[in-house]
Image (cartoon, rainbow, N blue to C red):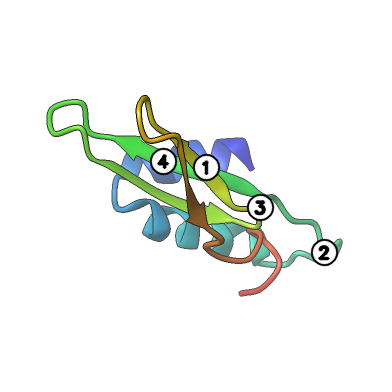
Amino acid sequence: SRTVLRAMAFEGGEPGAVLSKVNDILARDNTETMFVTLFYAVLDLQSGVLAFSSAGHDDALLLGRAAGSESLGFMGPAVGLVD
């Protein structure tokens, strides 16, 4: 699963689209019903924009220096479970 994620990440795209591609590959012929939970984020160092997507994890928290923390919320199901 790590290799598939890396390969899809190098192709580029928004995190949600990358996780969709990973899911398509891992869900194919998944007779063992195995799955992966993950949080995937890309930080643009020039703009400071953080793009992210989650698959099956509990709510992620964004920790700020002054503001404390902010829940990013649940995003989607674990990767590999459903087509």
**Marks 4 and 3: CB-CB under 8 Å?**
no
**Marks 4 and 2: CB-CB under 8 Å?**
no
At horizontal 38% and vertical 60% (from top left) the residue drawn is: 17
Residue pointed to by mark 3? 58
Q: Amino acid at mark 1?
A: Leu
Image quadrant where one finds the C terminus: bottom right
At horizontal 67% and vertical 50% (from top left) the residue drawn is: 37
- Indicate whether 7 appears above or below 75: above
Q: Counting residues from the N terminus, which is met first, the one under dot 1 or under dot 4? A: 4
Relative to 16, is 75 on the left or the right? right
**What secondary structure is found at the residue carrying circle 2?**
loop
Residue pointed to by mark 4? 41
Closer to us: mark 2 or mark 1? 1
Relative to 33, is 7 on the left or the right? left
**What secondary structure is found at the residue carrying circle 4?**
strand
Closer to us: mark 1 or mark 4? 1
Q: Amino acid at mark 4?
A: Ala
At horizontal 22% and vertical 39% (from top left) the residue drawn is: 49
Residue neighbourhood size for the residue with mark 3, other residues' Cα within 10 Å, grouped as few (<14), some (14–19), many (≥20):
some
Instruction: Give the image location of residue 26, x and y in percent.
Output: 64, 57
Q: Counting residues from the N terminus, which is met first, the one under dot 3 or under dot 2? A: 2
- Which label number is shown at residue 61? 1
Closer to us: mark 4 or mark 3? 3
**What secondary structure is found at the residue carrying circle 3?**
loop
